[in-house]
Amino acid sequence: MKRLFMLFCVVILALGVVVVPTLGQDDAPSGVYYGTWPYVLPPDHNFNGFTGNGLGTNLGAVFRAYVELPPAIYNWGTQQFEGLLAESWGFADDGSYYEITLKSDAMWSNGDPVTSEDVIVTYAIGRIMGWTQFNYISDVTAVDDHTVRFTFSGEPSLVAERLLLKDYIVSRATYGELAQQALDLVASGAVRGDDSWTALNTAISEFRPTEIVASGPYNYTMDDVGDAFMTLHWQPNSIFSDDVNFGSLRLWAGETEATTPLVLSGELGHATNVYPAATIESFQAEGIRLLDLARGYGPALLFNFADENAPWNTLEVRQAMAYAINRDQNAFLTNGIGARATVYMAGLLDDNVPQMLNQDVIDQLNLYPNDLDAAAELMTTAGYTLNADGKWADADGNLISVEYTFPAEFADFAGAAQDAIAQLNAFGFDITPRALPWAEAAAAIRNGDFSLSVWSWASGSPFAATQFYGPIQRFNTALADDQPGIAFPMQFEWNGAEIDLDSMITHASDGLDPEVHRERAGEVALIINTLMPYIPLNVERSIEPLNENLIAGVPTEDTWLSNPSGSDHPMIWYLLNGVISPGPGAA
């Protein structure tokens, strides 16, 4: 298509006629990309990019990038950003601000150009919704039609750079009115926590766009969302519309259980679901290629601290639980060959600890080896004794009888949770498992409607501050005002001084000096390692089936294959830039 386009331009120039050729639906490439995602069905399904059951829920990090482009994507192999919506980006010489210049030919699906105004709109709403970026920046201004300046509130930050380059930009056509309300509210002097701020936050969350205005090469309507699959259709106005090789993306509904037969029957081209060891072996037996990528996270046991009388509000109980769980066993039952027991127990991915922490800090970390005697000693210190039934009871005879919720469709989290329950009950707890639909399980954590639960810890990020983020900030300080989450207190006394752990995490990777980063990360790591606000059970790898009969062109060796699964997934780059195409068996 590109060659034909260039030939057309040459002919037009030779004739002396100035015409800008445009693509139409008749120019759509042929072929279907067969993927999968556990989207929600209408009427819960909505097109809001800032709320639950919206675009983030229904498209995930990979497929959302095909609809709403972020400024850039990071190549972990070269350690460089590559532009998507952005043409250029960088820090000011004095470090006081960061600028992003958008590609001048970027367009929305409605025919409008993508401009700096869209970025202003995005961040106006993001500020009201409590985006992490505003821990680093104080102002967002347009320099010209395509350049946006982000002014730092403190020192420059590489973490802020990643946040600014990775968030999806939304259209002013959809969100302009709400954004103006946000700008007016900030100008009035209102701050988070004010009634007016909370009211606008609620209005944004409840906003339901009737259509999506897309900057990526694909889009969809509510009519495209079905019980079995949803379909994203090629649209002609994106800067990547002429590069992609698929006319539509079919996303089969469901998680591991639903997609396993589709992989084996040859109806699914690529999946990021987590499959048990036996299932992975069956894929190998069928000759299906497996991509082996870092996931950058693993399951963690989460506590709800809102109940002051909950057993785990006593430090020794949390530490005892960490000792009582055999994490090697837990890792195997989470994802077989695709999971490893957590080693350092400090909120950072084990592979990154040697780079992110100084050795003197690493030497101080408690590795919490599986030690039932140590666990029992801690329970005794906390005031518990074993009763005649082998259950731990407090001075009043109360057992540790609680529910542990987990997402039924997520094989990895379900496996991690059920094994942790079994091990803790064998140790003397009285925990009841409760499976929930995955979206309900996540909502229950956000709303504080749980006792124990499981969700991810850490993240696929090259920065300690971002790895620390989940779950201690993600399900705590980063939530909406009416969502208590895990309710772990972030301001407390530590080593004789009052600290703000939320601020320490947020600013751990501020500045451009790696040694300062390590020192700050070390302080946070020791606090998390000691206090155990959650138990990081294991770290996962993403073992992803790839059917090369349906999807052709994925390299076997490439710098992009160093990327983790998630918002930097190599398939994002491969699809948008035409590296992959329909295989011989694709429709």
Image (spheres, grey):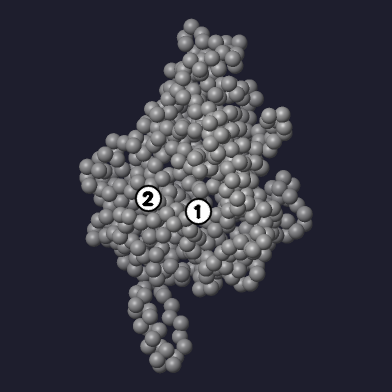
Q: Which residue is mark 2?
A: 36
Describe residue 445's horizontal placement relative to residue 34 as left or right: right
Q: Are marks 2 and 1 in contact (CB under 8 Å)?
A: no
Q: Which residue is mark 1?
A: 55
Identify the residue at the far bottom of this view: 15
Describe residue 182's horizontal placement relative to residue 388 as left or right: right
Disc 1 is placed on an element classified as helix
* Image quadrant in which the C terminus is located: bottom left
The image quarter containing residue 520 is top right
Residue 245 seen in render: yes
Going from N to C along the chain, the mark reached first, 2 or 1, is 2
The image position of residue 146, as x and y in percent, is: 59, 70
Identify the residue at the far right of this view: 189
Q: Residue at x 43, y 67 (%)?
A: 240
Q: Amino acid at mark 2?
A: Thr
The image position of residue 574, as x and y in percent, is: 38, 60
Disc 2 is placed on an element classified as strand
The 10 Å Cα crowd at callout 1, few under 14, some 14 to 19, many 20 or more, is many
The 10 Å Cα crowd at callout 2, few under 14, some 14 to 19, many 20 or more, is many
The image position of residue 458, as x and y in percent, is: 51, 41
The image quarter containing residue 279 is top left
